[in-house]
């Protein structure tokens, strides 16, 4: 089990979720009520699941493939910590991951 810490864009809220190897970060985030659309359902045809991976076992994740990097060009505020949550598959090597929501994500349900 991995501990995924979701951090709001302004850093004021944190939520903890647990995941198992093989889970997609997008699925874990959506199941935990995070405001990520994932409009294309993982086909890398949008950037509505853009997040920042800011801590934990980030270095254990494989680097994004070229198609993901190309799609991140369309994400507002993308930087070197940016990933598409639909492309991040959690492995047994991942024990913790800190995920910050970008400012362009607004969760009006909280």
Image (cartoon, rainbow, N blue to C red):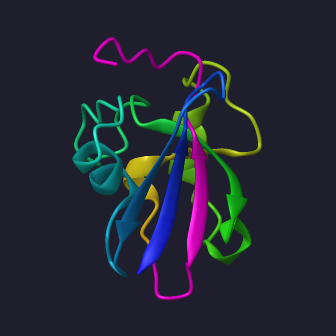
Left or right of 32 on screen, residue 6: right
Quick one: which residue is furthest to the bottom in this view?
A: 92
Residue 96: x and y, percent? 58, 70
The image shows residue 85 at horizontal and vertical percentages of 44, 49
Picture layout, residue 94 above or below residue 33: below
Type of secondary structure dominating the magenta stretch:
loop
> Is 106 part of what is drawn in magenta?
yes
Magenta residues span 91-110
Front-lying residue, 48 or 43:
48
Q: Quadrant of the C terminus?
A: top left
Depth check: give the residue in front, 23 or 67.
Answer: 23
Q: With respect to residue 51, does 57 lie above or below?
A: below
| Count of numbered marks | 0
Q: Which quadrant of the structure image shows residue 102?
A: top right
Using residue 62 as the reference point, say whether residue 106 is left or right of it: left
Examine the rendered structure and indicate whether residue 47 appears above or below residue 81: above
Going 37% across and 30% down the picture, which residue do you hit? 46
Pinpoint residue 14: horizontal percent, then vertical percent.
54, 40
Say which of 83 and 43 sits in front: 83
Seen from the viewer's position, the closer of residues 86 and 1 is 1
Location of residue 108 in the rendering, given as x and y in whole percent from the top left corner: 33, 11
Residue drawn at (43%, 15%), measured in percent from left and top? 106
* Rendered residue at 46%/61% (across/down): 88
> Would residue 32 be found to the left or right of residue 88 on screen?
left
Quadrant where the N terminus sits is bottom left
20 lies left or right of 4: left
- Looking at the image, which residue sits at the far right? 80
């Amino acid at each position: 089990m991995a501990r995924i810490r979701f951090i709001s864009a302004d850093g004021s809220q944190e939520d903890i979720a647990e995941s198992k190897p093989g889970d997609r970060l997008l699925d874990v985030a959506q199941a935990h009520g995070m405001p990520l659309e994932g409009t294309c359902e993982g086909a890398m045809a949008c950037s509505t699941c853009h997040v920042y991976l800011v801590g934990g076992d980030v270095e254990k994740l494989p680097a994004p493939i070229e198609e993901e990097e190309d799609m991140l060009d369309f994400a507002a505020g993308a930087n070197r910590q940016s990933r598409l949550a639909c492309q991040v598959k959690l492995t047994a090597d991942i024990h913790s991951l800190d995920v910050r929501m970008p400012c362009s994500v607004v969760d009006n349900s909280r």
